[in-house]
Structure formats: C-alpha cells, structure tokens
C-alpha cells in the first residue's frame, strides 16, 4: 500500500509513523499545496519539481504523483509537446514517478489521440499511454486499468 497526499507535511509526518512507501501528489505548476498555504510557505508545485525540491521530497518519501502535464505539457491546441526533465530529475533524486490520471474518453486525451467529436467515445488511449510510458515513468494512475495494463504490456513487448 502506497500512502499518498497532496500535502507534503502530511507525508513528512507519516514518514515517522509507518513503513509504507510514501508519495507526494503534485498539482499544476502554479498551484500551492494547502498545507503550504496554511503555513505561509510561498513555494508552489513548480518549486517542488526542481532538482532541489525533489531532493527534499526524497528525504521523506519514495515517490511523486504529478499531473500528466508536469511530465509532458500540452500546447494551446491540446497536443503533447516535448517532455519536461521531471522524470529524469525525479529518478536522479531516487524517487519513483507515477503521474495522474489517464482516461480513455476523448476529452481526457491529448488532442492527437482523440477520435471523432463524441466526448463519450474512446480515443486512441493506447497511443497516449505509449507516449507517457516513453518518458520513463514508473507507473501511471488510470481510471481504465484494463487499458493501462494492456498498453503497458504492448509498450514493453514492442
């Protein structure tokens, strides 16, 4: 069981109480964890995903769960751009990385993986999963684990 929280100080406290793997969930780059807001800590998620911020997280957690956009941003048309250095930087800090959340439906996929205009229709989720797996992530949150497992097997087996 991995214990996760959007509040880094909660994970810091848990690191002294349990032996379970711990992960800090990270929202968008401009957001601030609520515990930071409450204590007046001015840092944002953008600060936490720097090599320095990741090194600090690694002192009390084993992983991070960032939004998918922190791994591969999208352009104004909703298409994937070049991956950030987050995967590399997290691994260098000794952290595993499992971004969130992949879904099969068109509105939740990058634009290049959508099929047709029906928002309830499934797009090319396999293609999107492959694009994220290619960044070197260690896992991924998904609302469609059946698709995720098959896409991972397909990616690993070429």
Image: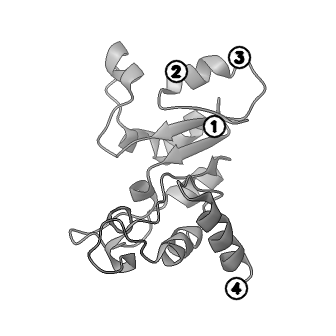
For label 3, the crowd category at 10 Å Cα-Cα, with few meaning under 14, some 14 to 19 and many 20 or more, is: few
Please state the horizontal and vertical placement of residue 28, each as a whole percent of the image.
35, 46
- State the residue at coordinates (44%, 68%): 83
Contact flag, marks 1 and 4 (Cβ < 8 Å): no
Contact flag, marks 3 and 2 (Cβ < 8 Å): no
Kindly tell me whether residue 40 is visible in this rendering.
no
Q: Earlier in the sequence, mark 1 or mark 2?
A: 2
For label 2, the crowd category at 10 Å Cα-Cα, with few meaning under 14, some 14 to 19 and many 20 or more, is: some
Q: Residue furthest bottom?
A: 158
Contact flag, marks 1 and 2 (Cβ < 8 Å): no
Q: Which residue occupies the foreground of this view, 89 or 9?
A: 9
Label drawn at residue 58:
1
Please state the horizontal and vertical placement of residue 89, each as a whole percent of the image.
55, 54
Q: From mark 4 to mark 3, how far is it between C-alphas?
A: 42 Å
Q: Which residue occupies the foreground of this view, 110 or 20?
A: 110
Which residue is the site of mark 3? 16
Kindly tell me whether residue 117 is visible in this rendering.
yes
Q: Quadrant of the N terminus?
A: top right
Which residue is the site of mark 2? 9
Please state the horizontal and vertical placement of residue 102, each as a whole percent of the image.
48, 59
7 is higher (above) or lower (below) than 98: above
Which residue is the site of mark 4? 158
Q: From mark 1 to mark 2, how far is it between C-alphas?
A: 13 Å
127 is higher (above) or lower (below) than 148: below
């Amino acid at each position: 069981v991995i214990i996760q929280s959007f509040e880094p100080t909660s994970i810091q406290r848990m690191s002294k109480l349990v032996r379970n793997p711990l992960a800090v969930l990270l929202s968008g780059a401009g957001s601030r964890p609520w515990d930071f807001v409450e204590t007046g800590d001015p840092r944002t998620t953008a600060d936490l995903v720097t090599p320095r911020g990741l090194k600090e997280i690694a002192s009390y957690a084993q992983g991070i769960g960032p939004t998918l956009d922190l791994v591969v941003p999208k352009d104004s048309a909703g298409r994937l751009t070049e991956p950030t250095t987050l995967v590399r930087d997290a691994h260098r800090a000794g952290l595993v990385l499992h971004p969130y959340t992949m879904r099969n439906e068109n509105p939740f996929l990058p634009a290049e993986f959508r099929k047709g205009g029906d928002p309830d229709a499934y797009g090319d989720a396999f293609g999107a999963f492959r694009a994220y797996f290619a960044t070197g992530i260690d896992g991924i949150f998904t609302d469609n684990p059946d698709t995720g497992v098959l896409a991972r097997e397909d990616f690993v087996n070429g």
